[in-house]
Amino acid sequence: MTARVGTTGLVFEEPPIWERSRPGRTGFSLPRRDVPEAALPPGLEGEAPDLPELTEADVVRHFTRLSQWNVSVDTTTYPLGSCTMKYNPRLHEAVVALEGLRAAHPLLPPALAQGPLRILWEAERFLAEITGMDAVSLQPAAGAQGELTGILVIRAFLARRGERRTKILVPDTAHGTNPASAALCGLRPVPVASGPDGVLEPAAVEAVMDEGVAGIMVTNPNTLGLFEENLKEVAEIVHAKGGLVYCDGANLNALMGVVRMGDLGVDAMHLNLHKTFSAPHGGGGPGSGPLCVRAPFEPFLPVPRIVERPDGSLDLDHGRPLSVGRVHAFYGNFGVIVRAWAYIRSMGAEGLRRASELAVLNANYVKERLKDVLHLPYDRPCLHECVFTDRNQTPRKVTALDMAKRLIDYGYHPPTIYFPLVVRGALMIEPTETESKADLDGLIEALRAIAAEAEAEPQVLHDAPVRAKRRRLDEAAAARSPCLTG
Amino acid sequence: MRYLPHTEAEIAEMLRVVGAERLEDLFAAVPAGCRLDRPLALPEPLSEPELLRHAAGLAGPAPAHRVFLGAGAYDHHVPAAIPPLFSRAEFLTAYTPYQPEVSQGTLQAIYEYQTLVSRLLGMEISNASVYDGASALAEALLLAIRVTRRHRVALSRAVHPAYRQVVRTYLEPGGYEIVELPWAADGRTDLSGLDAEEDLAAVAVQSPNFFGCIEDLEAACGATRARGGLAVVTFTEALAYGLLRSPGACGADLACGEGQSLGLPLSFGGPYLGIFTARQRFLRQMPGRLVGRTDDRDGRPGFVITLATREQHIRREKATSNICSNQNLCALTAAAYLALLGKTGIRELARLNRDKAEYLKAGLVRAGAEVPLAAPTFHEFVVHLPPGAPERLRDRGFVPGLPLGPLFPELEGAHLVCVTETKSREDLDAFLEEVGP
């Protein structure tokens, strides 16, 4: 098999949608007008918005052509580190389309919404079991909102204890959302450097932990793909000074059924259902970032809470005086939660554990088979992802970006690059468990071929990609004179 | 398991490459005391047909009730062309378009979304969307606080109660003060209290407001800007701007609200679409992703995520917001929906929604119901149904709107009733028949 699975086909150019517009067209089937017109009081009516006029076929062809310019999990291996681009089962799309879920109004009297409420209730229970926590709020619409909610809960818990702490510890391997979420909660992030092994050292935490620190935000496994093996000890240090431990669960795909953060002293954590639990990413969302907490934090979770009445029926409880309030107008991204619920019901305990084992096997396999050509800054067993750098290619003036762009020509989505920030020129590969050995061998051969090209003809890499819809785009010009609308 | 591709032989071979004997050995870095020593307690796995049957049983059949609920989630017809377009794998299963050369489809579609919602709301720029209408409003007020360096905002009490709760949750940690503006007897926001206010970062009103009333946006925006604050218009029903004067035309600085009506199913409250539009001058203070037009190396037009230095993955704690994921697929859906409707379609659809609501409202008044708020409404209104009518309606398979007492004690006994194009005249007449003579 050739290393190059990508090939060129017929790719259509397609202008912005309004260029197809012709006056008088419509693509919408209006219901029959069966009521009289009612005059609108003067002064309220506006100009009709300047929307393009198109037939249904125009719109369908337009967006179909656009879709063909995307690479996706369904088209090829998408080893984007920290993003868990696993296969998204089609069954879940059929489940969310069930009329009783799709058409359910969020404000239906609970008696008429027992089905949707039951799914939410079960999803909460499943996620609590998987994380080893006691209570779950499904309201956060994405990971960053889950973090925000988690830190708000921690803040409210401390305030209830009469404490106002102003700092939070954030390891240097953290996702950017961690310090940003903390800042939104009025906490000043204090960076903690990871040790030479790429993991947190208790001494480093001890050195900055004091009574002004609300807690620590830890990603486990961290963004180097390494297990934070000192987490229990770190948690003890933080707890001893009255702080709390928050875990960013974005990388849970490594540990389902193997480790539960609740058993390691973590007080609160969020999950990314669009990563670990197979909901599709949709080109950037919608996601879902449930917040899981230990029992003492439950009273602070967002309202409403789903509660089971003595007769077994489910209801919504708004009367939670200690709650941080709401973060969503309703109950979160229900459709995404349904997909995660379906995934857990399909996989079961054994399937989830197997998924994590194979995700870790795949990452280690890629690491072992590439470490002779790509520089591996932390040469030790990894979990779900491995981080290389462009150091071996630097003498030929080839960067991580060049290698990423060249991988496109070979028919693969690039890995995450230049993250985590603690590694210079990072290439972060997360294969996920749904890629077969043959898929991985293809990716590995492509990266090896690219490493060889970097030696022999680096210009090929500087010029890449040449086989995509577009060549490299001028991002500097886009930022210099922004054009956001047509 | 059909999603896991590895054969036993492949596992053995891969383990050999990585130097491990068994799969468990891969977790050698995890101290023994950290490992779970039992299987997770989860229900037995279900096969595809079993799961479908189980889920269908839970979901139940399509609601047999005739539901007249709105209040931030609206039952509009979703054109048949839309679901197949956005269940296309290339849109559905791609990640955030960080690699523009292989994401031009998503990027151009977001650019089109930004353009079409800006046109709908009469605004100059839009981001690629935020989580929902409530967080869009909260982010708008945080933007106003950053720009004006003032720490107080005014929020109409006629803004959706859940939105006000989300605003409180987002603003509380910064110690920002929220002044609530009451509503007047006609159901619109009473702006007279603004006369005594000098240091407001923003004034936020919703139109149509929670009671369905169309606000005097021009007055609200004018009064706000005269005091150096930002005029923020929020909305739960974007479709209303197919008919009404746009926030931009009324002088809004920021127009941020919910786009669920634009082609998204009710789906028990989400995923929906947080629309965030603004005047050009707030570009660099916008939260979330922005897509801009540029050229590639060969001079061909293309699209990229731009001005990312505002965002959390670059700026970390100094970012304009912590938001990362947007509601991308929902935004693309809205773009296609607006394109299907077009300029004339959206006007006719919006008008039809209002006319149907007016038909029911007039019929209810004739039947002895009282409409306590006199301001003009779009497709929702507050009504005191005659005694006995709500119970009768419920017994006959109607959900006759949202009871307002728990949210607004002063409207105890009243319902918020919504009518969209999905209700036929027959539905409306049946409702009226239950109410009375």
Image: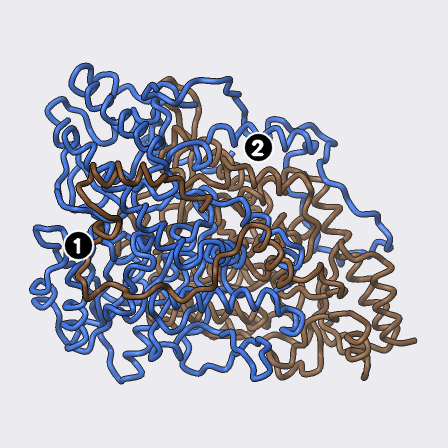
- Pointer 1 local density, CA inside 10 Å: few below 14, some 14–19, many at least 20: some
Circle 1 sits on which residue?
B29
Q: Amino acid at mark 2?
A: Phe
- Residue B231 in sight in this render: no
Residue at the image position 76 percent from the left and 78 percent from the top? B384
Looking at the image, do the residues carrying marks 2 and 1 touch, with CB atoms under 8 Å apart?
A: no
Please name the color used to draw chain B: brown
In the rendered structure, the answer to whether residue B429 lies left or right of residue B335 reads right
**Image x and y of residue B436, in percent:** 89, 76
Q: Amino acid at mark 1?
A: Ala
Q: In the rendered image, which quarter is residue B305 located in?
A: top left
Q: Viewer-proximal residue, A33 or A349?
A: A349
Q: In the rendered image, which quarter is residue A5 located in?
A: top left
Which of the labelled discs sits on residue A63, or is there none?
A: 2
Subunit ID for the residue under disc 2: A
Please name the color used to draw chain A: blue
Q: Residue furthest top?
A: A457
In the rendered structure, the answer to whether residue A245 lies left or right of residue B76 reads left
